[in-house]
Image: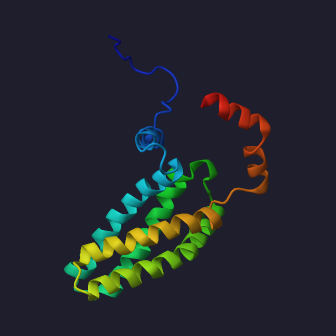
Amino acid sequence: PYTMRCRELGESKLDLAVALDLVLLLVHKGMRRALPPRFLRFLASGLVGGTFHLAVLGLFHLGAGVAFPLAQASATGAAMTINFAVNNRLTYRERRLRGLAELGGLLRFCLASSIGAAVNIAVADRLFGLGTSWWIAGLCGTALGSVLNFALSSLFVWARSPRADEIATSPGLDFLREQVR
């Protein structure tokens, strides 16, 4: 067996993003490539936001006695901010926004996600009004809003430039892709 030694030079390239990619690649292969890897990363990032969302929702609704629609809206806004940060660093790291572009990206993400948020709040409020438990109603609203958020954020926040699309579809890359498969 091999015994690992202490690293003498540089830093390890194995960070959270690489470890997450490995796990999600195994999930992707295990699911017979049913979902694209980027969507799986988006869902993994969404788990962070979803957990944060439910914590804020429970804290506001149960802990502070805030009416459910207002608590759901507050939790949604907080989760959108967390989701942007995680997606910017993990899901779209090769297109990561920095500096003022990051602030602009957050604003575009929140604007694009507002459609998903409106659907999220409406669905959750309707389910809650029908007697569904607060956390199930919140989770259902969040799930539906997440699908819309993925589509809209891919188009309006981290969209590829026409030049990047041109490079990504070049014949040389097509040849390499075929060799890898």
Depth check, front residue: 170 or 11: 170
Depth check, front residue: 149 or 84: 149
Q: In this view, does 75 lie to the left or right of 117?
A: left
Q: Quadrant of residue 137?
A: bottom left
Give the number of marks.
0
Q: In this view, does 103 lie to the left or right of 24?
A: right
The structure's colour scheme is rainbow
Q: In this view, does 54 lie to the left or right of 38?
A: left
Locate residue 21, reporting x and y percent.
Answer: 47, 41
Q: Relative to 164, does residue 158 appear above or below in the rendering?
A: below
At a point 61% along the width and 66% down the height, the residue shown is: 105
Q: Looking at the rendering, in which quadrant would you find the N terminus?
A: top left
Locate residue 3, reporting x and y percent.
Answer: 34, 13
Q: Relative to 132, does residue 51 appear above or below in the rendering?
A: above
Q: In this view, does 52 lie to the left or right of 147?
A: left
At a point 39% along the width and 20% down the height, the residue shown is: 6
At a point 39% along the width and 71% down the height, the residue shown is: 142
Q: Looking at the rendering, in which quadrant would you find the C terminus?
A: top right
Locate residue 139, reporting x and y percent.
Answer: 32, 70
Q: Relative to 92, does residue 70 appear above or below in the rendering?
A: below
Q: Relative to 27, does residue 109 appear above or below in the rendering?
A: below
Q: In which quarter of the image is residue 108?
A: bottom right
Locate residue 132, reporting x and y percent.
Answer: 23, 80
At a point 74% along the width and 56% down the height, the residue shown is: 161
